[in-house]
Each structure stands twice: as C-alpha cells, then as structure tokens.
Image: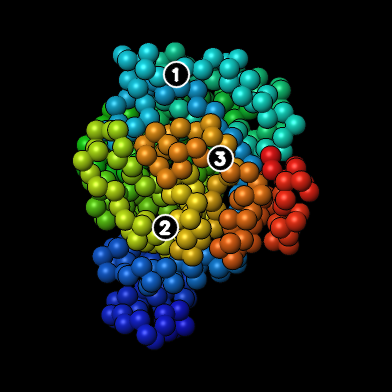
Amino acid sequence: MADVLIPSSLSIDADLAAVASKVQNQERITDEDAMLLFEKGSLSFVGTLANHVRERMHGDHTYFNRNFHIEPTNVCLYSCHFCSYSRVYAHRDEGWELSLQQMLDIVKSYDGKPVTEVHIVGGVHPKMNLEFFVELLEKIKAHRPDLHIKGFTAVELDYMFRKAKLSITEGLQKLKDAGLQSLPGGGAEIFHPEVREQICADKVDGAGWLAIHEAAHKLGMHSNATLLYGHIEKFEHRVDHMRKLRDLQDQTKGFNTFIPLKFRNKDNDMSHIAETSLVEDMRMYAISRIYLDNFPHIKAYWPMLGRQNAQLSLSFGVNDIDGTIDDTTKIYSMAGSEEQSPSMNTAQLVTLIKQARRKPIERGTLYNVIRDYSDVNEQELDENQDAALLN
C-alpha cells in the first residue's frame, strides 16, 4: 500500500516503506517508527505522509482565529536558559508589570471588533497570585462575556496553586469559575528530565505539566500542547515527549492542538547553539502530524516561523496558523523570530492561506467554524469594501 503515497521515483528502504504502509492503513506508528522517520526520513518522504494525514483529516481546510494577547509581565522567578523574554525578579526594573486596569484597558481597546479570544500568558511574578488573576478574569468576563479566555501556562498555574496552598483541581476550578475556559500549551518545553534539568530545572517538571493538563481536561477544559525543539535535545527526547502527550490524549481527549516551537537563540543563555534549518523545521511538523494520530490539529505559530514559512508548513501536516494576534505579543519577537511586529488582519490571513492553495476557515478557540472564507473573492477582502474583515 505504500506506493499509493510514495512516488516510485523516491527510493526508500523496507523499514520506511513499512511506516508508509501503516500511515496509509491508518495504523498507529510506534516510537521506533518515529525515530526512523527522524533519522532516515527525507523531507519529501515525511512531507508526503504528513500531507496525506492532514488531507484525510481536514482536506484543504486551514484554520485561523481572531485573537489578541495580554502579557501581564515578563518578570519571572524562574531562569530558563532558552528564554529571551523574561527578566528575573531581582532585576524587575528591566521588565514590565501590568496592573489589572491596564490589562482591562487592553481588552476594552478591542470593543466593537470581532475578536473571539484573548490569550493571557506571561512570566511568573510573585505578586501576581491566584487571587490577582481571579479578579482579572472576573473583570474581563463582566466587560465582555462572549470573549473566550485562554490563559496561563502550567508553569504559571503550578506556582499560583502552590502559593495558594490549593490542589491542582481546586485551583483550576477557582479559575474556571472566574471565567477561564481553556489552557495554552506553553511551558512544556521537553519533558525528559535529562534535558529539562539542563534548560529549565527550577520550574514545574514534565510530570507536573501533564498533571495540570489532565486535571483541566477532567474539568471539561480543553488545552493545547507544545514542544520546544532545536536546542540540546535529541530525537529520542522529542519522541518521548510526544509519546507522553499521545498517551494522555488517549485517556482524556482534551488536547485541541499540538504546536512545535522552534528554539530561537537571540539574547539568551543558549545563544551559542545554532538554530535549526527550515528543512528540519518542516520535518518536525510533518513527523508530529504522523505520530500524534489522536491530536485533531497541528498548528504553526506564524509569528515565530514568518509568513512564507507558515505557508510552506501547510504542505507538511499543519492545518492551523493561529490568529490575527496584533502586535501585543513580545515572547517571540524578543527571541529573534521572523516577525518582529507580529500583526495580521483577517484579510491578510485569508490571502496568505489562499496563496498556499488551501481553504481559510475562521474558527473559535474550540474549532467551531465561524466563517468559511473559501469563496470570498479579492474584492470582498478589499479594505474599502468590507472594513469589518480587517479587524
């Protein structure tokens, strides 16, 4: 069956052909298969397999949403060596700390605009405790009840709950009652302790990250998952990480999206490590799509990759390129990402997806379809014809 997927002009060995056959027959690949793909799978080979899976699951549909970010602070108690964003608490004068009112003012600045999600994530600040964020969530919900609130990495949540002397479930329930609806996937980095102890030893470990997301799923909250690749980790660490995610997803079905995050080496303690090539980036997306057969979506975060590379990823298993975002997010621009002022309006996102010969679908946070832009023509996307599209 492998020849259905793999062109005869592409010479592959028997082991890779066996993996292709599994993918063709919708059989789960093993960790050993995934290692084989990382070690021997060419870009064209893994790309063909990943695109087959992507199109079987989603056809040409490519999702985006209208969102904006609030980053409460870049002051952080932790000292992750890969991070270009945070400022340690002892030097907090070099960072920013937003008040409740300042954050609510950001929300109010989108009044009258058809955004559907606010994404709240930042550093771990000792003064921004659970009660602080409960009040923030309540104020946002009171002002704009229709806005989906996705917030707080497991790293932030772990600190909040421990400081409040609450269990994970108790803390999550308190935030959920205040208005929190889903969790982002940040803070996962690499679960394996062999790597985690070298790059971010002082924050919640892999088991703790997984426990928080499992508890969220059991409370009916969906979440995303990430993996930070391209630094000191090896292929086996990537596979170990994805296996733990796949195992948890088998149990809970609570993950929406997997997002591979490329390590960026600007202005951090790991600046001596060269960044991965575009070829390796696309291989990472492709193999994650093949391996994570129970994850509905694979997302490429376009501000990190850049617009053209995000388009390219749509041929390597990706079916979501995040959202309009606005230029409020600094996490990746400070690390040297391709987009230094990450902002795209709806019309630009729709055009970008169409240029890649895919069908743009505006979604809500939980992937409910808001609008199919497949048949919207260029005239309708013109700023003078439909200004609402540009918000």
What kind of element bears circle 2?
helix
Q: Which residue matches tag 3?
A: 343
The percent coordinates of residue 187 (x first, y second) are 39, 36
**Residue beneath the point at 39% across and 60% down:** 282
Disc 1 residue type (three-letter): Trp
**Left or right of 279 on screen, residue 52:** right
Camera sees residue 132: yes
Measured Cα–Cα span from mark 3 to mark 1: 21 Å
Disc 3 residue type (three-letter): Ser
**Residue beneath the point at 58% across and 44% down:** 344
Q: Which mark is residue 96?
A: 1
Q: Earlier in the sequence, mark 3 or mark 1?
A: 1
Which of the two marks, 2 or 1, is nearer to us in this view? 1
Q: Earlier in the sequence, mark 2 or mark 1?
A: 1
**Residue beneath the point at 50% across and 33% down:** 329
Q: Which mark is residue 285?
A: 2
**Residue beneath the point at 66% across and 26% down:** 109
The percent coordinates of residue 335 (x first, y second) are 36, 37
**Left or right of 347 on screen, residue 52:** left
Vertically, is 11 above or below 127?
A: below
Disc 2 residue type (three-letter): Tyr
What kind of element bears circle 1?
loop
